[in-house]
Amino acid sequence: MKINYPPGRHLQSVGLGRREHGVTLVEMMVALVVGLILLAGIVQLFASNKQAYRLQEGANVLNENARFALAQIQYDLRMADHWGGVEASEVTLLSGLDSVTSNCAGTAAAIVATGLYGFDGTAASPLACIPATDYVANSDILLVRYADALRKASGKLATNDFYLRSAIGRRAMIFQGKTKASLPSDLVSATPTQTDAYAESPDAANYPFHSVVYFLRPCASQDRGTAGVCDAADDTIPTLARLTLRGTSLVEEDVIAGVEQLQLSYGVDLNADLVPDIYRRATDITTNNEWAKVVDVKLSLLIRNAERDTSYTDTTTYQLFGGVNGAPVSYTVPTNAQQFRRKVYNAAVQVRNMTRS
């Protein structure tokens, strides 16, 4: 059957002639711009959150580093001047000991029965065992020596390591594992009755000897340029480091990176009541010959975040321990390091072996 449509209306009535409309170029450009704006906002939000996370993570690492660094220094300070139940004045050195490689000279030498010694910060390194390139200008240096709390059996002594042989209440002597047989008879029994390599006097024992030097180094890694020193090829991250006696060498060890300043003040007991009467800097204690009277140490660590914050400028002048007669030391952040966030950590440590009654 044939259907007749009115002229001009039959195509429209069945929808065969309707025009289809798409997106115009203008509409597309507007949508694109709006999308880009939204995307830019999302990217900016993501970048801001990421930067905030990195800064917060850096702050957490800073606190962890500070706790670790303080724990290391505090332990050594608390052990300083421990000589196995003997006064430092009764400790002598066995003759014929090997020399220590790259030893710090004079009173700063590794094999000395002086529990504490220090140097105030200077423009150049005050110690020959710390090269000028490995020293942060004007930062203090701390030397600590002591006998370990744990005894060492004579049959297990390392050949080149240094030990203290102590007879409680009488005297002690520093020796090397290979020189044990040369110790005087009052420290080693003349009639062996044990299965050890050497029989022990009943009241004497061996203690590993420790000598540690804390200082600040101007780089964290020494591997990019000349190995073993900080140079122009290395980074510029100040690092707390230490020289530790290992056998017949002072071996450099990293403690933590990011320590910008180390300052120390020493409490001196002037009237023998085991309480600090005045705090002095290292130079004055050396001049007054008062190292044997130091019973307390105050230290300041200025530690900075590992992440640079370009939105932050630190122009603070920090007050640290270590000035003349207990006065603070002022430290202003260098211009090239003002975009790091930093924090001062202070601690006071009693030198227990100097205050024993």
Image (cartoon, rainbow, N blue to C red):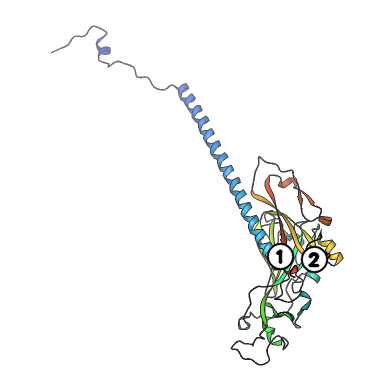
Q: Position of residue 256 (x, y in %)?
A: 65, 58
Of labels 2 and 1, earlier in sequence is: 1
Marking on residue 273: 2
Give the residue at the far bottom of this rendering: 191
Q: Position of residue 164 (x, y in %)?
A: 70, 78
Q: Can residue 193 be seen in this view?
A: yes
Q: Residue at x 65, y 43 (%)?
A: 309
Quick one: label 1, few (<14), some, or many (20+) residues within 10 Å? Answer: many
Report the Cα–Cα distance between label 2 and label 1: 20 Å
Q: Which of 201 and 328 is in front in this view?
A: 201
**Which three-letter amino acid code belongs to the residue tagged 2?**
Asp
Quarter of the image with the C terminus is bottom right
Marking on residue 328: none
- Specify the quadrant of the image occupied by residue 160: bottom right
When the figure is inspected, residue 244 is found, relative to residue 231, above or below; the finding is below
**Which three-letter amino acid code belongs to the residue tagged 1?**
Leu
Q: Which of 221 and 318 is in front in this view?
A: 318
Q: Residue at x 54, y 33 (%)?
A: 41
Secondary structure beneath label 1: helix
When the figure is inspected, residue 171 is found, relative to residue 293, above or below; the finding is below
Q: Which of 94 and 31 is in front in this view?
A: 94
When the figure is inspected, residue 334 is found, relative to residue 147, above or below; the finding is above
Give the residue at the far top of this rendering: 7
Quick one: label 2, few (<14), some, or many (20+) residues within 10 Å? Answer: few
Marking on residue 77: 1
